[in-house]
């Protein structure tokens, strides 16, 4: 079977890296330049992507469409690709109930649920694409030469549930760590906390500094992801609220800056 024509919506940092791996494996990967920025166009060219012009044209021609976008945009991207008649893989960090609802926007497509775990892929071993749903095995078989695609047993929503549970720990605990260090600084006991961390939790100082850098760079993407996690917890009958607090941490984080800038911003009420 020849490699499918893949449509990619949209080539941000993660999407462009995914597209580059697919292009290197012999796939024709298309993107839609209409309404996108010059920076996105540069990333697409560097990844070897072919411009289909519009999302509608891309969705109509591609055998398989991958949606890789910020969580808050997942629904709008699916609606724009409503003409898709192939396989539509939502790879975004959204709750199971959210991804299931996308089927209403894609009446002619076969919807596959996806969740990406890991950094933008430089090699297939570093990043996993988990997929679930009736066409999940087809996605694995057709893309596995380029990406580490792993099928999660279950229907649409299973892969997103895995992603939500994973991110609840990784990004949720990073937000809690920043809030804890922010509390210590606000109360004048940060030096004492760092001394205790050095004795009993020697990795936490470096982790808090790494969390601050990540929050400044990517917090604007993670805010909605944390809210989706709260929705997933509530829908499962579990205590929620963790995600909402983490979302507030990431909402307050500046778009750039070091630990001092991030901790300073956490105390400033928005608006």
Image (spheres, rainbow, N blue to C red):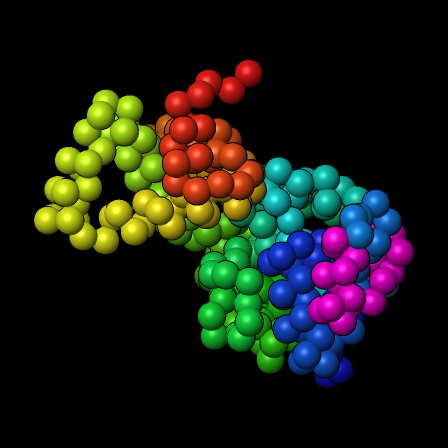
Q: Is residue 197 visible?
A: yes
Q: How many marks?
A: 0
Name, please, the residue furthest toward the top: 271
Q: Between 98 and 41, which is closer to the camera in this rendering?
A: 41
Q: Quadrant of the N terminus?
A: bottom right
Q: Nearest the camera: 93 or 262?
A: 262
Residue 229 appears at what percent x and percent y?
A: 45, 38
Eyeballing the image, is 142 above or below 58? Answer: below
| Residue 227 % position (x, y) | 49, 33
Q: Position of residue 264 (x, y in %)?
A: 40, 29
Where residue 57 appears, as percent x and y from the top left, is: 88, 56
- The residue depicted at 44 percent of the width and 28 percent of the height is 265
Using the rendered image of the protein, determine whether residue 86 is visible from the camera's viewpoint. Answer: no
Q: Residue furthest left?
A: 199
* Quadrant showing the C terminus: top right
Above or below: residue 47 compared with residue 220: below
For this rendering, which residue is in front, 21 or 55? 21
Residue at left offset 79%, top offset 57%: 41
Q: In this view, does 222 lie to the left or right of 4?
A: left
At horizontal 76% and vertical 42% (from top left) the residue drawn is: 79
Q: Report the front residue among 132 and 175.
A: 175
- Residue positioned 14% across, 42% down in the render: 195
Q: Is residue 72 magenta?
A: no
Q: Is residue 227 above or below residue 74?
A: above
Tell me the magenta residue range: 39-59
Q: In this view, does 11 lie to the left or right of 261?
A: right
């Amino acid at each position: 079977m020849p490699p499918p024509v893949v449509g990619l919506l949209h080539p941000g940092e993660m999407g462009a890296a995914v597209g580059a791996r697919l292009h290197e494996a012999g796939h024709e990967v298309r993107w839609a330049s209409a309404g996108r920025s010059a920076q996105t166009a540069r990333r697409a060219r560097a990844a070897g992507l072919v411009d289909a012009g519009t999302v509608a044209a891309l969705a109509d021609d591609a055998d398989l469409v991958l949606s890789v976008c910020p969580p808050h945009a997942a629904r709008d991207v699916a609606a724009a690709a409503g003409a898709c008649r192939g396989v539509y893989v939502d790879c975004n960090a959204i709750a199971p109930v959210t991804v299931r609802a996308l089927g209403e926007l894609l009446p002619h497509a076969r919807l596959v649920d996806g969740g990406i775990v890991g950094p933008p892929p430089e090699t297939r071993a570093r990043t996993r694409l988990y997929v679930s749903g009736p066409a999940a095995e087809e996605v694995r078989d057709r893309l596995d030469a380029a990406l580490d695609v792993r099928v999660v047993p279950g229907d649409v929503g299973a892969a997103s549930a895995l992603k939500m549970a994973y991110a609840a720990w990784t990004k949720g605990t990073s937000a809690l760590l920043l809030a804890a260090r922010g509390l210590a600084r606000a109360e004048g006991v940060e030096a004492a906390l760092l001394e205790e961390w050095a004795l009993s939790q020697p990795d936490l100082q470096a982790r808090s500094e790494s969390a601050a850098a990540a929050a400044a760079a990517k917090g604007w993407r993670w805010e909605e992801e944390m809210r989706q996690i709260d929705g997933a917890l509530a829908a499962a009958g579990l205590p929620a609220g963790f995600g909402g607090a983490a979302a507030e941490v990431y909402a307050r984080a500046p778009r750039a800056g070091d630990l001092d800038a991030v901790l300073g911003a956490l105390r400033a009420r928005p608006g």
